[in-house]
Image (cartoon, rainbow, N blue to C red):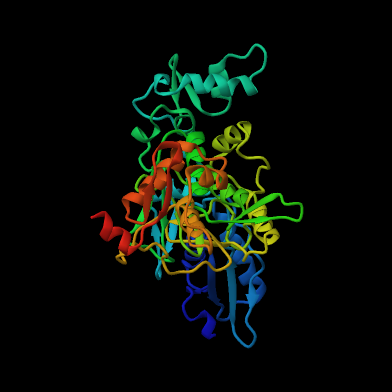
Amino acid sequence: MDEYANVPHLQLTTPSALNELAETLAALANGRGGTVLLELGALPVDDAIDRVRQAALMIEPALHLPGPRELPGQRSLAVTVPSDLGRVFGLDGRYLRRDGTQNRALSGRELRELLMQRGDVSYEEEAVPNTTADALDWIAIERYAARVKTRREATRDVLIRRGCLIRRDGKDIPTYAGMVLFGKDPQQYMRGAQITAVRFGGASMGDVFTRQDIVGALPEQIRQAEAFILDNLRRNVRLTGNMARDEEYEYPLEAAREMIVNAVSHRDYSIRGDDIRLFIFADRLEVSSPGRLPGPVTVDNIADERFSRNPAIVQVLSDMGFIERLGYGVNRIINLMRNQQLPPPEFTETAGGFRVRLFNRGASVNSPFLTNEGEEVTLNVRQEAALAHLRRDGVSRITNGELQAMFPNVHSETIRRDLADLVGKGMLLKRGEKRGSYYILLKAKDKETSI
């Protein structure tokens, strides 16, 4: 009986027992499930099971439960409410949740949040107050509509069909889905609908970091987040047997991209006080998004269960090519990490959100970014590569062109700024002018000479 010490106990023989049981079952169903222990007294077991079924049928919609379990040597039944129910349950017009040892009525706000979480109401389908269609970027919309509209279909009708626009009293009003997908300035109407991207030098948060606040419509946010990842992930470069250049990032790029796309697709946009966080540490990459897992999805079944909190957003991003295989993002992340022989991803449901972590092969948790004076600074991966190149035996200098060859997809002006920043940080010294210029490590004696 010790395992049931902290679960609700009910006497089935009292006049109010049936209603109390229905209330407790509904309250558990609207939470994370749980068990209620029924003390039978002289009531036969079969009659007790019938009363459990009767109580479950009093709930709207009817609650389907696994069979009660009779405890050996006890005049008790254990009734378990599953934790992965995807509906909201009412009793006589009331909606309850278990709070400690009591069944408590949900407030209007709590009920709305639960309805959204479980998919009975969709926040993305609601019209954005005090807006008109002029708040949308119609150039971007026309490009999108050209992909999906039928021959005679008007562009605005495409948005209505996709759940991005609502027509009321002859006026077209953006939905929250339409605003975050195509808005000129979505953050004006949806606070927190952005990504905070940060790279830290070590394995924990510190005072030295690189940060970018990524705003705009979702397609642009995805592109900027991908660029941030490319700029800040470490990579190993090696020559293959045929002398071809082979680069391997510390995480599969497609897995990192999938994390971003999943986060913007499935986060809870009704939560205004938080945004998506993309954090890169020395040993891991993590993406946290507001809102717990929706509907029947749990951490345990996340690789198999399919449920979308924002089906309109998911559909449009799929139309645009950001989501290639609907519903298989988690499986893809798992497989990509396995294929690169990296630890499996970690999925965690927090008090108010959801987090995915990728771990690398064990990068040093000590920040390697120190100036000659021991001052800690933060560098991007290109700057790290430049310093690593200069610290190799027999290498004394590096040019813009040599660093550009290491990162052929990065603009030459970005390369120039990277090297100039290292000069400004007191780590490199520039020699020569224009095309003949090159950079060397700044040693202590060089610094004394330059003063």
Q: Nearer the viewer, residue 381 or 207?
A: 381
Asked whether 357 or 9 is in front, the reply is 357
Left-right relation of 128 to 225: left
Which residue in the rendered view is the most extreme toward the top? Answer: 152
Judged from this view, the residue extending furthest toward the left is 451
Q: Position of residue 450 (x, y in %)?
A: 27, 54
Work out whether 242 lies above or below 35: above
Q: How many marks?
A: 0
Is residue 413 visible from the viewing direction of this image? yes
Quadrant placement of the N terminus: bottom right
For residue 319, side relative to residue 210 (left or right):
right
Q: Nearer the viewer, residue 115 or 144?
A: 144
- Where is residue 260? Give x, y as percent: 53, 47
Quarter-wise, where is residue 191 in the image? top left
Q: Residue at x 54, y 36 (%)?
A: 313
Answer whether residue 109 is visible to the viewer in this image: no
Q: Residue furthest bottom?
A: 73
Picture quarter containing residue 343?
A: bottom right
Q: Residue 417: x percent and y percent? A: 40, 42
Residue 243, position as x, y percentages in the image? 72, 52
Question: 32 and 233: which one is in front?
Answer: 233
Residue at left 39%, top 23%? 135
In the displayed structure, would residue 297 be above or below residue 416?
below
* Quadrant in the picture for the C terminus: bottom left
Q: Residue at x 37, y 24 (%)?
A: 131
Image vertical order of residue 11 relative to residue 202, above or below: below
Task: Please tell me which residue is depicted at 76% across the width and 56% down the height of the picture.
Answer: 241
Residue 190 located left or right of residue 162? left
